[in-house]
Amino acid sequence: MGNDRALGAPLYPDPLLPPLRAVVACLLHIAVFVIAVIYSFVQGLVFHKNDGSPDKRQHAAEKNKTRSQKNGPVQSDPNGPCVPPIHPERLKDFVEDEYINGNFTTWEMKISGTPEQLLTDAVEPLASKVRKPSVRPKNEFLRFEDISAAAFKIQSGVQKTPCMYSRISKQYGIDIYLKKEYLQYTGSVKERGVLYLLSSLNEDQQRKGVIVATDSNFAMAVAYHASELQIPVFVIMSAGTSPNRVKMCRDYGAMVILFGPTARDAQSHARRLAQENGYLYIEEEDSAGYLAGLGTVGLEIYEQVPNLDTVIFPAGGHCGLLAGSAAALKYLNPKITVIGVESEKFPIVQQALKTGHCLTEHDYLTHPLYGELGGPSFGTNTLKLTKKLIDKVISVREEDVLLSMLRLVECERVTADAEGAMGLAAIISGALPYLKGKRVAVVVCSGNLPLPLLRHCLDRALVLDYRVCKFSVILPDFPGEITKLLEAIGREEVRVLDMHKENVFLINDLFTLEVTCLVETRERSHSLQLRTALAERYSNLKWIEQ
């Protein structure tokens, strides 16, 4: 066979394998020996460094004592933390003495000369930085952090209302953005301040309950949010309060009590109940918490409308909204112009800015159209903020307020009350001509006007807008004369709303009658066209002016 090893025969090991195994074993023994030597050497160094023999400790202490007597004491703790040494190269211009103190080295610097000379020869001082004064107005009473905290705390309890571009903008050449705070659950911006106040009460006071004495939007906000927070709430109103307002507060969850003929009587009764039963008497005051809650409107406007130029707020009864929001806006962008608007009949803010203190002649006075005019809501704190942060406060006529309410209903489908329409009234009145072409935010703060009063305001606004006219003519008391008058009116495309005839209480001829017509026109030019046409036909035309 060609193969000497038969199939299945045992395999013999290689003859070189035993010598290799001997060499490897020898190397392993050498490595173990080297490691043992290195370990012993290291242990010897550590023992020498940390030698704790009493003789050596005493010798080191005597050595330190001798040197301290020579050159002064050296404060050092051998067992304490190791202080990094001062590098000798930094002291090359001085006489250096080295001291061994424990495990580290210190350097004593011997400097010749008097202290006065040292101060005179010191290195030249660095140029001091010139700090420019901050453009943000400082406000110690109401901080931006307070407003931010309020925004975080009430974010789940109030609506973040939109600030939308208005179709009214084209009529006046201004980019108008309406902040629609009337969309809050109770129809008023005051929910923001009320919710922050109520949520900041301690548990004991929340358990006892709160009481308020007013029939304004503030009372409805307290009634709603106190009920939502499971806080007992009582609302005291005068006997002459609107039944609809009483019903709304009760629907929100408050216990409503009618007391006394005036608002002052209701407030006195509420204070007495609060003292007897431990309730917390709440009123619309200018506290930091309430203003911080209202100031969240300014935060949202700044976030929603970029490149904003001007913001217009209602003043007067809503001066807390004006001051709180101005604090936020001026902090975020001091270049934003903040304008307050109030009624020409009640220029409360303007008078206070002139005299330097809040007037009390309108305290506890509630106007059917403008609501509460004064009281604690416009106090010393609000006056200081207004004087510091508000750029301008203007007053508008009642006619402009009514026209503003009409424009909001027609163009925006917004049934705002007088306070809510105050900001747009400033633009309609023409008192701010420099706003042409700018981006302006207008706050529509509330929309809680009773329906009869709303209807009356809109009817009056249509007359002011020359869209509802009234006139009378003297006609012969014969058949067909009234028909001829109606035909003349119809040719001018005018709609007759009402007609009344009188033929008894007249000083004219017996066979005459006076016809009075109430008509609707498209605009002022259309009204003038009708008046001209009727004056040509009837010489005794009497046009009833506004």
Image (cartoon, rainbow, N blue to C red):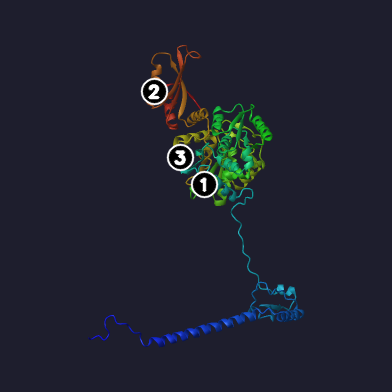
Q: Amino acid at mark 2?
A: Ala
Q: Which residue is mark 1?
A: 300
Q: Which residue is mark 3?
A: 168
Horizontal arrangement in the rendering, residue 155 relative to residue 61 (left or right)? left
Position of residue 371 measured from the top left corner of the image (x, y, whole percent): 58, 33
Distance between mark 2 and mark 1 Cα atoms = 55 Å
Label placed on residue 107 = none
Horizontal side of 75 relative to 346 (left or right) equals right
Query: In x, y percent, where is residue 495?
Result: 41, 26
Q: Which residue is mark 2?
A: 488
Horizontal and vertical percent position of residue 356: 67, 43
> Residue at the location (46% across, 43% down)?
164
Q: Is residue 295 above or below residue 11?
A: above
Mark 2 burial class by Cα count in 10 Å: few <14, some 14-19, many 20+: some
Residue 518: image location, x then y, percent = 45, 24
Which structural element holds mark 1?
Answer: helix
Q: In the rendered structure, which disc, 2 or 1, sits on the residue that comes first in sequence? A: 1
Q: Residue at x 36, y 88 (%)?
A: 15
Q: Nearer the viewer, residue 522 or 452?
A: 452
Three-letter amino acid code at the position of disc 1: Glu
Distance Cα–Cα, label 3 vs label 1: 22 Å
